[in-house]
Amino acid sequence: MSGDGVRIDGNTLRLPGGVAVRFVRTLRLPETGTHPLPPGLGEFPLRRVSDYPDTVPEAWRARGGVMLPMYLREAMWLSFAGTVEPAALQVGVGKVCAVSGKPWSNRLTRKPQNYVVLPRQPWLDGINSGKGTVRQFVAVPLGLGATVEGQVTGEEVWGGVQLQTFPLGAKALARWREEERLRAERARALTPPGAYGVAMPMAMAPPPAPAAMPAPGAAPRSAPAMGLGVGGSMRQEVYKDDRPATDWAEEPAGRVFVHLVTPPEWRRITGEEPPPSPVDRAAYTRAGLPWFDYYDDQAQDLAPTDTLEGVKPVGDWIGDDHEPWQQPAPGQVKPLKGKPVEDGDW
């Protein structure tokens, strides 16, 4: 399962229509309570499956796509920074929609909505599971029944993450581009000369180190397959689409299958060392490093579906989480968007 025009730029996955997706390592939340947004701790490395035809499992070669390494119970979030033009992005976990809980589909639906709207949705940390909350994406092996796929469908066949993007239709895109042109002209007219200052160059990520070649004659084998279950709950909206459904193209522009690889298999397949194991979250909090709170007073949040509300955390399947938890101090929770001004009697 792969798509025309899908490419890797550093560790950013770029899909047709200007959609940019990064897979970000993060702290795993406790499975009880509702928490602020955890920080990003760097990007997962991405590699193309087709670059390792001699060492990836045969089924992966058939599906194509990309792969990234994850530790057992490691958490991730998806960043959509860098997406410019509007797009509808479907996110599947084991071919179960992370927004609606419905089976994977090649069509956009509204009842229930089975996609996020970019760039309106800046990120997605987990499945849509409650009013104004999501349950964190957490890696678990297939075969235990702990994945979202296993709990929703009763089977664990696919694993991984699936992405599919739909652009605006031709008329809606032309209208949006004209609106953006007029908005830019108004902004230039209101900006004094010299207000922009000197542009700073963007830091470029270093290219990945050359991969060690697998041993001659090394045959591909069945890799331990990984999927996504859920962990703790955090405050995050999944935005309701406010565009007419007819604005979107009827056919997807591109799709890609993202395989999740255990660190030992990553080393065997690619010859590269995986990232170090995730940082201890109590040590992070004790160091005074920030957590985040994102408040959007303009948000129209999607209601959770019964299917996803009932998904149980991975601890119910593979045991309690014994990693120590330390609640962040109030000053460590940094707002990412301004709070509303309260009105009173006049």
Image (tube, helix red, strand yellow):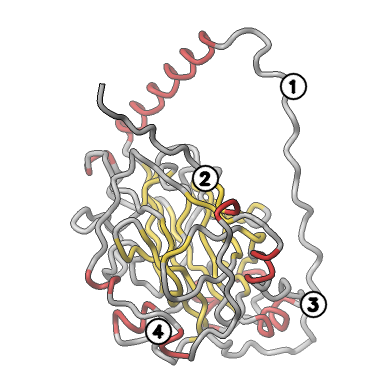
Element carrying mark 1: loop
Classify residue 342 by image quadrant.
top left
Question: Closest to the observer: 36 or 261?
Answer: 36
For badge 2, the amino acid type reads: Pro
Where is residue 62? Give x, y as percent.
50, 76
Q: Between marks 4 and 3, how big is the CA–CA gap?
A: 30 Å
Give the residue at mark 4.
157
Q: Residue at x 45, y 76 (%)?
A: 31
Element carrying mark 4: loop
Give the residue at mark 1.
198
Tag in front: 3 or 2: 2
Where is residue 104? Give x, y as percent.
31, 68
Q: Between marks 3 and 2, how big is the CA–CA gap?
A: 46 Å
> Eyeballing the image, is 316 above or below 2?
below
Mark 3 or mark 1: whose residue is earlier in sequence: 1
Tag in front: 4 or 1: 1
Q: Are marks 1 and 2 in contact (CB under 8 Å)?
A: no
Give the residue at mark 2.
335
Q: Between marks 1 and 2, how big is the CA–CA gap?
A: 28 Å
Where is residue 225? Give x, y as percent.
52, 84
Question: Closest to the observer: 92 or 213?
Answer: 92
Q: Residues within 10 Å of mark 2 (few under 14, many from 20)?
A: some
Q: Between marks 3 and 1, how big is the CA–CA gap?
A: 44 Å
Q: Residue at x 53, y 49 (%)?
A: 20
Q: Are marks 4 and 3 in contact (CB under 8 Å)?
A: no
Residue 213 marker: 3
